């Protein structure tokens, strides 16, 4: 996507040590959401009353003092020029750290709206908690996540309408040379509630839930 992005962070707000405010704003052409160009603004505002927390998954710095932060995000994309199709997204996220402990929560809400059809909503959220068993090197964590359908129908999974998907997993993350390279291993369970086929939503009866265990290996690079 192409556009203009502004960012800044203000430390020691109002003369209070460690109090931090951060903003991020951008104006893009919207090509990330569709093949058509249109103005697509996005923003995020975050407040850290006891000191800034880097946007990473883990207290790899093992701060001795507790810290927490809260942020709000919003994005808008009209999609096709000169049409009434609008997609919006907003999110809240919380983070807290203390001496190797890490907790984060995110909530997302997506809305697709046109004047010719009812608005379609989708909501997602997750909780994750971890602890550095080896400072700056090895973290153990647990995560619970849920993806839910809005009031006007679910989302499509393998040709069927899904109401909710729930995932629970645990794992470990190893940090190589600080936070530049991270290896993550997870094992967990994912369960999706399925209804009638999306090609025939009037079909009667529900289907058996789709349930699976998984192992996931991820490499994460920061530069």
Image: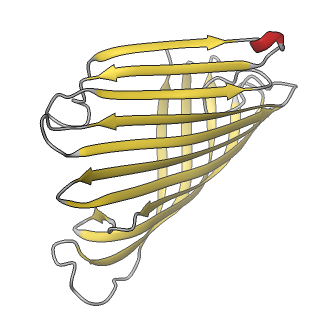
- State whether residue 209 is above or below residue 214: below
Q: Residue furthest front?
A: 115
- State whether residue 28 is above or below residue 152: above
Left or right position of 4 against 19 = left
Residue 46 occupies which quadrant of the picture?
Answer: top right
Give the colour scheme of this rendering. Answer: secondary structure
- Quarter of the N terminus within the rendering: top left
Q: Is residue 22 visible?
A: yes
Residue 105 occupies which quadrant of the picture?
Answer: top right
Judging depth in this view, the residue of 192 and 38 nearest the camera is 38
At 65% from the left and 39% from the top, the residue drawn is: 94
At 39% from the left and 20% from the top, the residue drawn is: 26
Q: Is residue 179 visible?
A: no
| Relative image position of residue 85 (x, y in whole percent) | 20, 46
Left or right position of 134 against 1 = right
| Relative image position of residue 52 (x, y in whole percent) | 71, 21
Judging depth in this view, the residue of 112 and 52 nearest the camera is 112
Judging depth in this view, the residue of 151 and 18 nearest the camera is 151
| Relative image position of residue 99 (x, y in whole percent) | 84, 31
At 17% from the left and 78% from the top, the residue drawn is: 200
Count the marks: how many? 0
Left or right position of 148 against 178 = left
- State whether residue 14 is above or below residue 103: above
């Amino acid at each position: 996507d192409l556009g203009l992005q502004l960012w800044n962070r203000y430390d020691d707000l109002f003369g209070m040590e460690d109090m931090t405010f951060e903003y991020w704003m951008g104006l893009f052409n919207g090509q990330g959401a569709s093949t058509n160009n249109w103005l697509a603004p996005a923003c995020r505002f975050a407040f850290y009353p006891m000191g800034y927390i880097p946007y990473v998954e883990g207290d790899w710095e093992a701060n001795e003092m507790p810290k927490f932060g809260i942020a709000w995000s919003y994005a808008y994309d009209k999609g096709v020029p000169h049409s009434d199709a609008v997609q919006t997204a907003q999110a809240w996220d919380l983070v807290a750290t203390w001496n190797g402990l890490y907790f984060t929560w995110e909530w997302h809400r997506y809305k697709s709206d046109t004047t010719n059809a009812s608005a379609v909503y989708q909501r997602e959220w997750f909780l994750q908690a971890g602890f550095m068993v080896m400072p700056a090197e090895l973290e153990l964590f647990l995560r619970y996540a849920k993806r839910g359908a809005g009031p006007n129908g679910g989302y499509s999974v393998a040709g069927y309408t899904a109401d909710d998907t729930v995932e629970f997993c645990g794992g470990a993350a190893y940090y190589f040379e600080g936070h530049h390279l991270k290896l993550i291993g997870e094992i967990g369970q994912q369960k999706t509630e399925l209804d009638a086929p999306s090609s025939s939503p009037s079909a009667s009866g529900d289907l058996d839930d789709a349930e699976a265990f998984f192992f996931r290996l991820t490499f994460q690079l920061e530069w």
